């Protein structure tokens, strides 16, 4: 075994400094909030596409996907179906919709459709969800690497270094810095992933056939889950088995699809990437690039997880290792000197790409949907009445707010508790609160009947129920402790059903924004700043 060495640490440090310097390089090009938040709408399809991929592939996912294969076998590969199922909706519905609206945030639309309270609710859900997610995204990899290196990578210092560096270049360079650093982080992440897959396969007797034989003996090659008691269960009992089992084919397909639809359609981190592109065609090409990269990522990381099952048995890994510690243990104790450093850098890269994107998008939402809306009384940062002085002030406030938020997230990350292994955290937390958020947009865009107060109630209750399903074990609410895949789906169903039913019960206002549904918006061209 080869332990993590000084050259590996040096490689990590050089990489982190390079990324920070690259982000700072874009400081001089930021003169307006449009530059800071939307990169002046100048980005090409390749950086947009690679940034989309790098942003969603947090350190949690980078470790979590192999962990899923280690726990449930190759059944997790069903998650690939989320791409073809979500692709047409993203490409032909939401992308042209946002480009037609010409907004800074997705939540700006909700005021047009309903009122400012719904806009604040959706933007607030996004910000709170992303803060929690960002804190976890930099805590988990730091924690796992701390464990498998016996403290050589100290937990709190790792968190602080990651948080401060990503915050600094994000505050200085804005979204352009975020996108271009994401491109380099994508290269490091995927390079490390491919290297790991090749090394594992080369060091397992029999290569890929040998790996398959090994995992087949352990029953890890099944493409469907075995549910005890299924054959003798009635319809209600079968429903409960599906609901309370962590991983089934249906749960994986549905939850991954809901998660991807939510991320790609109403998550400001993703929507903001579309809006930085030069035009709609460029956005679509970037998304296609992301889809191919995502499919390759899932296949490769599932292969890594499956191969580690065979590798760990042949090379006698410590028996006390948790599932989410096997991949990091392989990196830090088996990989050659230098390669191990690049792999550690790739895990840190995945965490930084999530933190920088999250900080910039949260500040975009805060500046546009709260500060600009309530303090300056402007409905959008695109408002033509905003003076040059106010633009400069908004840019200054955005930088200060980015620094403050980065510090808050870094501080919170130091105190993130355990919610289970990395795959559990990934399934629950990353996709969880996107459910009710996506449900609110479904009500807004695709139903004429929905109106403000029922939607507001549905959003609050849907978020509350989703939170109970995510934190049920910690809160001691066994009734809400469903399978790890289901919180986002439950959030969508609860929000949409409750909002639609209440819209028939609660009296409808004289103006309910029906001219801002998807069909209405796509039929019209809007010329003035209010789009009326």
Image (spheres, rainbow, N blue to C red):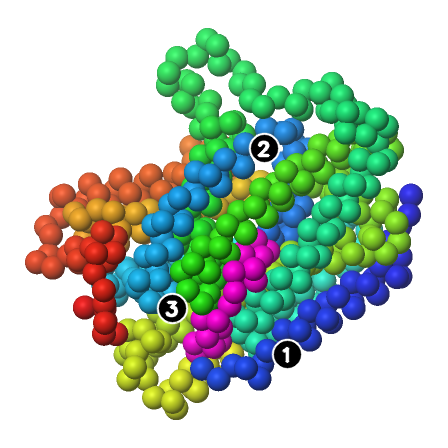
Q: Main secondary structure of the magenta part?
A: helix
| Above-or-below relation of 226 to 273 | above
Q: Tell me if mark 2 has few (under 14), some (14-19) or many (20+) residues whose alpha carbon lies within 10 angstroms of its own.
A: many
**View extreme (front): residue:** 281
User: Is 185 colored magenta in this rendering?
Assistant: no
Q: Report the mark closest to the observer, 2 or 1.
A: 1
Residue nearest the viewer, comparing 513 with 141: 513
Which residue is identified by label 3? Answer: 104
Gap in angstroms between the C-alphas marked 1 and 3 = 24 Å
Q: How far from the left and from the top, in percent, is residue 518?
A: 25, 53
Q: Are marks 2 and 1 in contact (CB under 8 Å)?
A: no
Q: Is residue 386 left or right of residue 31?
A: left
Q: Residue furthest bottom?
A: 389
Please report the residue visible at 57 percent of the width from the left and 68 percent of the height from the top: 178
The residue stretch that appears in magenta: 33-54
Q: Earlier in the sequence, mark 2 or mark 3?
A: 2
Contact check, label 1 and label 3, Cβ < 8 Å: no
Observer able to see residue 471: no
Q: Check disc 1 and report the residue beneath it.
A: 25
First in sequence, mark 1 or 3: give its number: 1
User: How many marks are shown on the rendered structure?
Assistant: 3
Question: Which residue is depicted at the point 41% across and 67% down?
Answer: 365
Q: Pinpoint residue 355: horizontal percent, then vertical percent.
A: 58, 62
Residue at the spot x=58%, y=33% of the render? 77
Q: Considering the image in quadrants, where does the C terminus appear? A: bottom left
Q: Quadrant of residue 390?
A: bottom left
In magenta stretch: residue 35: yes
Mark 3 residue element: loop
**Which residue corresponds to mark 2?**
76
Left or right of residue 236, residue 506 in this image: left
């Amino acid at each position: 075994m080869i332990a993590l060495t000084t050259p590996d640490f040096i490689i990590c440090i050089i990489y982190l400094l390079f990324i920070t310097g690259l982000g700072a390089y874009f400081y001089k090009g930021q003169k307006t909030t449009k530059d800071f938040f939307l990169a002046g709408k100048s980005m090409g399809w390749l950086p947009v596409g690679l940034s989309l991929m790098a942003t969603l592939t947090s350190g949690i996912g980078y470790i979590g996907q192999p962990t899923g294969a280690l726990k449930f076998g190759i059944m997790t590969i069903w998650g690939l179906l989320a791409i073809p199922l979500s692709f047409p909706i993203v490409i032909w519905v939401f992308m042209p919709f946002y480009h037609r609206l010409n907004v800074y945030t997705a939540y700006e639309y909700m005021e047009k459709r309903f009122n400012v309270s719904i806009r604040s609710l959706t933007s607030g859900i996004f910000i709170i969800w992303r803060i929690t997610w960002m804190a976890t995204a930099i805590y988990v990899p730091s924690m796992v690497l701390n464990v498998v290196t016996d403290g050589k990578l100290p937990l709190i210092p790792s968190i602080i270094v990651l948080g401060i560096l990503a915050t600094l270049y994000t505050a200085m360079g804005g979204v352009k810095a975020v996108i271009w650093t994401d491109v380099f982080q994508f290269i490091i992440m995927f390079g490390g992933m491919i290297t790991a897959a090749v090394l594992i396969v080369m060091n397992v007797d029999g290569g890929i056939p040998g790996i398959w034989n090994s995992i087949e003996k352990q029953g890890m090659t099944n493409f469907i889950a075995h549910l005890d008691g299924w054959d003798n269960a009635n319809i209600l009992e079968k429903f409960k088995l599906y609901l309370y089992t962590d991983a089934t084919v249906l749960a994986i397909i549905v939850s991954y699809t809901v998660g991807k639809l939510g991320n790609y359609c109403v998550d400001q981190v993703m929507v903001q990437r579309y809006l930085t592109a030069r035009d709609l065609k460029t956005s679509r090409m970037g998304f296609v690039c992301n889809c191919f990269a995502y499919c390759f990522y899932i296949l490769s990381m599932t292969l890594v997880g499956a191969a580690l099952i065979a590798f760990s048995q042949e090379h006698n890994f410590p028996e006390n290792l948790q599932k989410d510690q096997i991949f990091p243990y392989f990196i830090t104790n088996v990989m050659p000197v230098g390669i191990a450093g690049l792999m550690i850098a790739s895990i840190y890269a995945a965490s930084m790409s999530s933190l920088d994107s999250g900080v910039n998008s949260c500040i975009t939402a805060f500046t546009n949907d709260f500060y600009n809306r309530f303090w300056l009384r402007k409905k959008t940062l695109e408002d033509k009445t905003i003076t040059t002085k106010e633009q400069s002030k908004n840019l200054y406030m955005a930088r200060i707010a980015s620094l403050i938020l980065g510090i808050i997230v870094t501080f919170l990350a130091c105190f993130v508790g355990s919610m289970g292994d990395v795959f559990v955290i990934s399934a629950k937390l990353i996709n969880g609160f996107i459910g009710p958020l996506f449900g609110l947009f479904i009500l807004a865009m695709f139903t004429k009947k929905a109106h403000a107060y029922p939607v507001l109630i549905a959003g609050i209750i849907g978020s509350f129920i989703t939170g109970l399903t995510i934190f049920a074990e910690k809160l001691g609410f066994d009734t809400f402790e469903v399978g790890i895949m289901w919180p986002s789906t439950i959030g969508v169903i609860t929000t949409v059903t409750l909002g639609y039913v209440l819209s028939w019960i609660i009296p409808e206002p004289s103006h309910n924004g029906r001219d801002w549904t998807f069909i209405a918006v796509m039929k019209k061209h809007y010329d003035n700043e209010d789009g009326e």
